[in-house]
Image (cartoon, grey):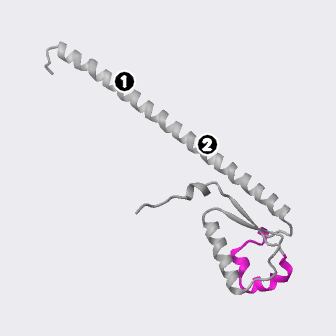
Amino acid sequence: MRKLEVRSKWDKLYVVVLDCSSVNALDFTCTKMLMRVVAQFKSRGIAILFGNWNGASMRTLLDGMDFFDEVDEGDFFLSMERAIEAAVRMRNEAREKEGERERSMEDERERSMEDEEKGIGEFLAVAEGEDEQGEEWLAQGGDS
């Protein structure tokens, strides 16, 4: 069987914004499923934000189900504009951290290569020195 890889398509996904303008109520099953989805995305380093949230009417229900133990209250926005602004900010911060990590890894690779080159140079210098000693030894007739 052949395994298909679709992950590369999502490698650079940082934030998902859900438009909740049509959400008037949530039941127990929906809330638990939403909590699982948020946890799965979070484990992959992807945030979920909720735009057009009509939170006041659902707040009591969600509090009763410990929804805000899993989902940060700061991920809910009254408008899509605010949610998208937050998403762009989060994406930019993630990219910046990613760039810092890449630069750090590049620096480490360069240091490693420099150390390796230095080690090879030292080895060659020692080998050349041993070569000269060997030539002297042969010139003296090979006796200790």
Q: Residues within 10 Å of mark 2 (few under 14, many from 20)?
A: few
Q: Magenta part mainly helix, strand or loop?
A: helix
**Percent of width and height locating residue 133:** 25, 19
Looking at the rendering, which quadrant does residue 27 occupy? bottom right
Give the amino acid type for the residue marked by disc 2 in the picture.
Arg
Front position in the image: 19 or 102:
19
Quarter containing the C terminus = top left
In what element is the residue under mark 1? helix
Looking at the rendering, which quadrant does residue 48 occupy? bottom right
Front position in the image: 70 or 109:
70
In the depicted structure, whether residue 34 falls above or below residue 116: below
Q: Residues within 10 Å of mark 1 (few under 14, many from 20)?
A: few
Residue at 57%, 54% (x, y): give it.
Answer: 8
Residue at 71%, 73% (x, y): give it.
Answer: 71
**Percent of width and height locating residue 19:** 79, 69
Residue that protrudes farthest toward the front in the picture: 1
In the depicted structure, whether residue 126 falls above or below residue 85: above
Give the amino acid type for the residue marked by disc 1 in the picture.
Ala
Q: CA distance from mark 1 to mark 2?
A: 33 Å
Q: Which residue is mark 1?
A: 125
Please indicate whether residue 75 sits to the left or right of residue 46 in the image. Answer: right
Front position in the image: 128 or 136:
128
Where does the magenta region start and end? Answer: 54-75
Q: Which residue is mark 2?
A: 103
In the depicted structure, whether residue 108 falls above or below residue 135: below
> Quick one: label 1 or label 2, which is nearer the N terminus?
2
Is 59 in the magenta?
yes
In what element is the residue under mark 2? helix
Please indicate whether residue 144 sits to the left or right of residue 26 in the image. Answer: left
Residue at 44%, 30% (x, y): give it.
Answer: 118
Quarter containing the N terminus = bottom left
**Percent of width and height locating residue 90:** 74, 57
